[in-house]
Image: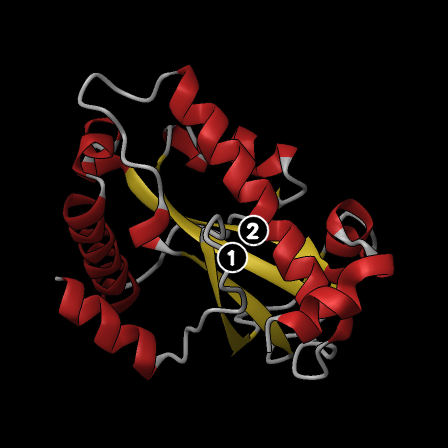
Amino acid sequence: MRRLDALLRRYYRIHEFSQDQDCLLRLAVIPAPRSLALRDRVTIARGEPVGDLHLWNERVPPIPPEGPGLAWAVSFHRRLRRSLEELAARVEVDPAYQHLRAFRAVGTLPVRGGGQEAGGWSVLACRFGFEPAAGPDPAGLWPRFLEFWENAFNLALVWAYNPASLRSRPFSRLRRVQFWMSRETLLARYGRSDCAVALFLSRR
């Protein structure tokens, strides 16, 4: 499973934008799958390049068998904030990312009836500045087939890297949920222009 994960990262050009040991995120550049308007009035056109964020699975703190406690939550929150600070520092100065006006993360999460996310991950994402942009349930046989295997693959990754978190993810209720953040929101919340250039140059 780890070898397949590495192969797919190369295929989809998912790469590390920071070597900070606390960074939990990787990045790919993809065409936006659909048009959308974010809450801060940034409008993204379908096909426009956007940043696609992925968890750096090997670095996610392992959840204890008894479940995520306070120490785990504090560690995860600290590392996720650090990851977004690293992303903002890179985005501010690296020409390869300056055309990206938005970033998204996709989670495979349990949902209630009507498509509402039932766990705490949606609340956590919003606290960090993301906003959910859930689309309609997949219609037709092929989209449902793709979602089924995407969910299965994500659960397999969880099993490989962090098996204790599987208890909160019943397969029958999993849906793909998108969370978005504009470049402006990322830089306003996590950017540090006074030191971004020095940070970027020191890690080239």
Residue 161, x across and y down, in percent: 21, 47
Secondary structure under the numbered disc 2 in the rendered image: helix
Using a 10 Å C-alpha cutoff, classify the residue at mark 1 as few (fewer than 14 neighbours), some (14 to 19) or many (20 or more).
few
Q: Can residue 44 be seen?
A: no
Secondary structure under the numbered disc 1 in the rendered image: loop
Mark 1 is on which residue type? Answer: Asp
On the image, numbered disc 1 is attached to which residue? 20
Given the current orientation, which residue lies at the most extreme front position? 202
Q: Which mark, residue 185? A: none
Q: Nearer the viewer, residue 26 or 196?
A: 196
Residue at x-position 62% and y-position 36%: 126
Q: Nearer the viewer, residue 76 or 42?
A: 76
Residue 110, x across and y down, in percent: 33, 34
Q: Which mark, residue 83? A: 2
Q: Is residue 101 above or below residue 10?
A: above
Mark 2 is on which residue type? Answer: Ser
Q: Nearer the viewer, residue 199 or 139?
A: 199
Residue 162: quarter of image: top left
Q: CB of mark 1 within 8 Å of CB of mark 2? A: yes
Q: Nearer the viewer, mark 1 or mark 2?
A: 1
Tally of marks? 2
